Image (spheres, rainbow, N blue to C red):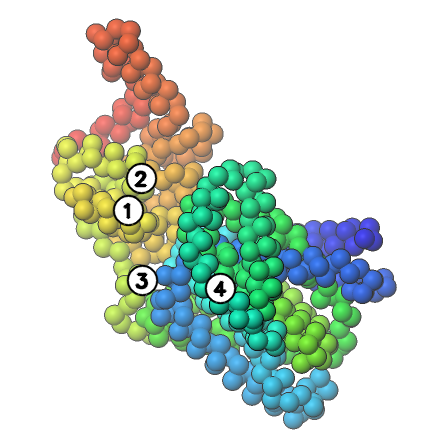
Amino acid sequence: MEPAIFIITLLCGILVSRVGLPPLIGYLAAGFLLFVFGIDENSVPLLQTLADLGVTLLLFAIGLKLDLKSLLKAEVWAGSSLHLVGSMMFFVAVLKLLALVGLDRLVGLDLNQLLLISFALSFSSTVFAVKVLDESGDTQALYGRVAIGILIMQDIFAVLFLTISKGEFPSVYALGLLLLPLLKPLIYKIFDRVGHGEMLVLFGLSMALVMGVWVFEAVGLKPDLGALIMGILLAGHAKSSELAKSIYYFKELFLVAFFLTIGLNGLPTIEDVGLAALLVLLIPVKVMMFFSLLTHFKLRARTAIFASFNLGNYSEFGLIVASVAAYKGWLPAEWLVIIAVALSISFLVAAPLNANVNRIYQRYHAKLLGKEKHPLHPEDRPIAIGKPRFLILGMGRIGSGAYDELKSIYPDEILGIEHKQELVDFHLSEGRNVVQGDASDTDFWEKLERAPELEVVLLAMPHHIGNMFAVEQLKRLNYKGKISAIVQYSEDATALKEAGVEAVYNLYEAAGAGFVDHVVKELIDPQVATSGLVHADHAEAEKEIAPTLSKP
């Protein structure tokens, strides 16, 4: 393979990343640049193979993360379906109008071709949306979960298209695939025993490329569909997230080849760039349609506008659809280049808009609130917490233990917050006062009702970033009480204390002190008082928080 491919692709990716945009824009630009240097897709056949692998692993990874229950929510399945139909109708009408005006790339296209282009333009970018959500820490926010659910539904629509595009009836042996769920126990046993290293990666690639691609292709089905279904089959396993992380860089690397092959199809003309820019000007209509649909399903205006902006772009899946259509001869090849340019420009526009979506929301807050439908969605209503004196964020083993200790002294004055609904249900059955909420989510703090009698907040979440975020939000809300937190590392303790946390409890150091305490008491000298061996950090935390724990 030409060394220039690696160097130019790397440099373009770095330059684009430095300005805060997804590297895939750089990879598209690298493809165009390589074409200028005389390299096309026919001169490097390996690139197309790698590109196909990238798409396959992308679908497999989507399947691994797919929560089928989340797709059954009306705002997800109905919202995405209605938006797809509405977008296609809108784009067909606009494209037909532009054809009547006389744009060369549209003159002569029939209705089926306009529908194909509109279908490709109706998608939003999974890569862009996930990047924005990761950077903002809102992956688990309601608007983030709704946006990702809609994106997954769009991906499923794309896979159905890819399957239909094969144009062949499957073999009768395809009916045997209905027995795949019966193999689930065996596959899960193998999954349990492959460990956590290269065997895990090999297992994932085997499931995607052999059980998925090869088997489905052998019975006349689209291999991409096989990769998605195998991912869904494995999604319920405890190690599915670990597997998704293990194959992440394989998927990302192979997708680089896909974006390069788009650019290698040829340079856009001035007319192509102008048409792509016109398509980008239509994105606000997509955003308004999303907002209208999401508020119709009784989501808050804030949730709806944040999700809509996150979805306000064109998609790499639109490129995949256009690529298949161009390969089959259903669309002129230049449309692949036009959509690639429109995708790149849409990212350039969407990045600053998503960065400033909160300012936009605040500016038009009154008007947007008028679009809300009441009663609000059950997951999007204000969180009532009553009048607790003690608030525990994170009700895992440590949070639960802290709750029980406090309850023995201060009954009916404690509230726990836990983001997993199954844990909330468990705690309620155990008689604990716990409500569902994610303290690492900005939405949680926006919906949280004020607690005027709150004196102490205990941060018992497992991740330092989540605890730090909670401290920032408490400051933003002008909380004046005490804050205590658990940490795993000494540098985390320093950061929390600098942020204003009064009492920090180091889990590892305290566990060591507790272990020695136990050994001395049980094995060496049963007369030794355990209190004399409490770790200094623990004692200091108790000393600092003790004045707050006294009854008024």
**What residue is drawn where x is 39% and y is 25%?**
508
What amino acid type should be assigned to the residue bearing mark 3? Asp
Which residue is labeled 3 in the image?
A: 380
Q: For mark 4, what is the residue?
A: 176
Q: Residue at position x 48%, y 81% from top? A: 86
- The reply to whether callout 4 and callout 3 are in contact (CB within 8 Å) is no
Q: Are marks 1 and 2 in contact (CB under 8 Å)?
A: yes
Q: Kindly identify the amino acid type of the residue bearing the numbered disc 2.
A: Gly
Query: Tags 2 and 4 in contact by the CB under 8 Å rule?
Result: no
**Residue receiving disc 2:** 396
Looking at the rendered structure, the secondary structure element under dot 4 is: helix
For mark 3, give the secondary structure.
helix
Residue 361: where, in percent of width, then height?
Answer: 43, 65
Labels 2 and 4: the sequence-earlier one: 4
**Dot placed on the residue nearer the N-terminal end, 1 or 4:** 4
Image-based side of 390 in relation to 125, left or right: left
Q: Residues within 10 Å of mark 3 (few under 14, many from 20)?
A: some
72 vs 474, nearest the viewer:
72
Disc 2 versus disc 4: distance between alpha carbons? 43 Å
